Amino acid sequence: MSPKHRYDVLIIGSGAAGLSLALRLPESLRTAVIAKAELTESNTYYAQGGISAVLDAHDSVASHIQDTLGAGAGLCDEDTVRLVVEHGPENIRWLLSQGMQFTRNEPADQGYHLTREGGHSHRRVIHAADATGKVLEETLVERLRARPNLDLFEHYNAVDLISARKLGRAEHRCLGAYLLNRESGHVETFAARFVVLATGGASKVYLYTSNPDVATGDGIAMGWRAGCRAANMEFIQFHPTCLYHPHAKSFLISEALRGEGARLKLADGSRFMPGFDERAELAPRDIVARAIDHEMKRLGSDCVYLDISHKPAGFIREHFPTIHAKCLEFGIDITQQAIPVVPAAHYTCGGLITDHRARTDLPGLYAIGETAYTGLHGANRMASNSLLECLVFGETAAADITANLARAPLAEGIPPWDESRVTDSDEEVVVSHNWDELRRFMWDYVGIVRSNKRLDRARRRINLLRHEIREYYSHFRVSNDLLELRNLADVADLIIESALRRRESRGLHYTLDFPLHDDRNQRQPTILIPESYAPKG
């Protein structure tokens, strides 16, 4: 039986990585873009700060490289860093050619406004006010809708990848994916010459996160189950400043505020960052997040405060209109008051291992954006390098797919999804209970500060939870909540295992049992290999 959907390229995910890749593929290729919710609902849409690139005459590629290596705490792959940084300016020019509107200096003929964020030694972050991701996402979606070769599927959630070996065939290749149509409730089969995982990160594995609900590690989990290696999953970036308010859900307070002079303060108005790092508020995110966590625990405080009210009111409203308006909704006028903030899980620095052409261990399968481990971020992502990484590897993946299309025939005889031996669940409460338990123990035991004791507790709980989920998955029809829970549990297992293997503190991984760096034994990525791993060739 032929699959219902047949494509040259299947892109699962609709953030900057997936959309930019789709736009760079030749119009002769039939391409599908899959979005779990609305097309624009992605981590990209909520990215406020901007995109880092060397665009100023006083800046240099060498400086951007050194800043990135420094933030990565000795674990960045230098070749990858150089590749990404060197391709930065041309990718900004590509975005401008697509109609992207960045904020200009006043007067406008003085070029684009560049801001500076934590870890950067120069102003090199180009932005669209404080809503760069929203403008970027909407710009790319508008261009996509005009492309006749692109089919856009909203409200589809990927279930699993289809590989030749899973079907009992001798070849070693990805052939497509099964996807749940969330509106009909049925699983549909998508066959493709190439599959691209661009599903974003996994920060919803934590109780408190800046991420939207779709960030459940789907691509990482599916790739792992299909036999792809993963790396550096212990390095979860906690953004230092999310709005603390009982009615504010996952609202990020951009690092750009600190780049423009905002100061972190305690309830009594005193600053504390200078006591932790000479760069104070402009230190990398791991240092700032740990400092806030330390002060909150020391004082028993619910939050700390970010204050930019010493800047002119007009400057604040012009540069941070989104944050200003959102805070006003909660009765906080940031031109006059400090903003209550707390750290929250923000970015997954690890992921599926890829090469410089975004290829995973499974031929025919690519991973880009936050789903991938490229070596760019090392032990800590420097601010605004993430959107740049999406664009650069979207570009390299598109080039590799185009070059290899003739050697990738469309698979035949892929069986449809089999629901004949399952029933509708009458115990959905199990899913919601396990979801809540998972996110709570990950926050408590595998958060900003860790220990062997906490990690061991987390490992015992995740083993029990994954057993329950596998049993539930095998007996009942899949639902969106069940698929997300299954993926989050698999990703949580990878995070815990990686954290247990790293017996030192470095970057985003801080453990009370090993508080120092161990450059002699631990200065390499943490690589996890699944039982189903099969090397290429």
Image (tube, grey):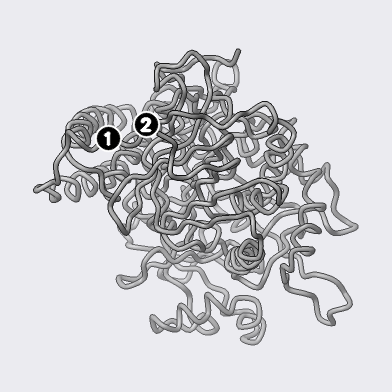
**In the rendered structure, are the residues bearing label 1 and label 2 in contact, judged by CB atoms less than 8 Å apart?**
yes
Which label was assigned to residue 285? Answer: none
- Choose between 535 and 209: the one closer to the eye: 535
Direction from residue 141 to residue 157 in the image, left or right: left
The quadrant the C terminus occupies is top right
The quadrant the N terminus occupies is top left
Residue 372: give x, y in percent of width and height.
56, 37
User: Type of residue at label 2?
Assistant: Pro
> What residue appears at the point 40 percent right and 63 percent down from the top-left corner?
250
- Choose between 210 and 3: the one closer to the eye: 3
Mark 2: secondary structure: loop
Direction from residue 356 to residue 428 in the image, left or right: left
The image shows residue 143, relative to residue 477, as above or below, that is below
Quadrant of residue 331 within the rendered picture: bottom left
How crowded is the residue under tag 1: few (<14 C-alpha within 10 Å), some, or many (20+)? few
- Choose between 23 and 49: the one closer to the eye: 23
Residue holding disc 1:
418
Mark 1: secondary structure: loop
- Choose between 183 and 330: the one closer to the eye: 183
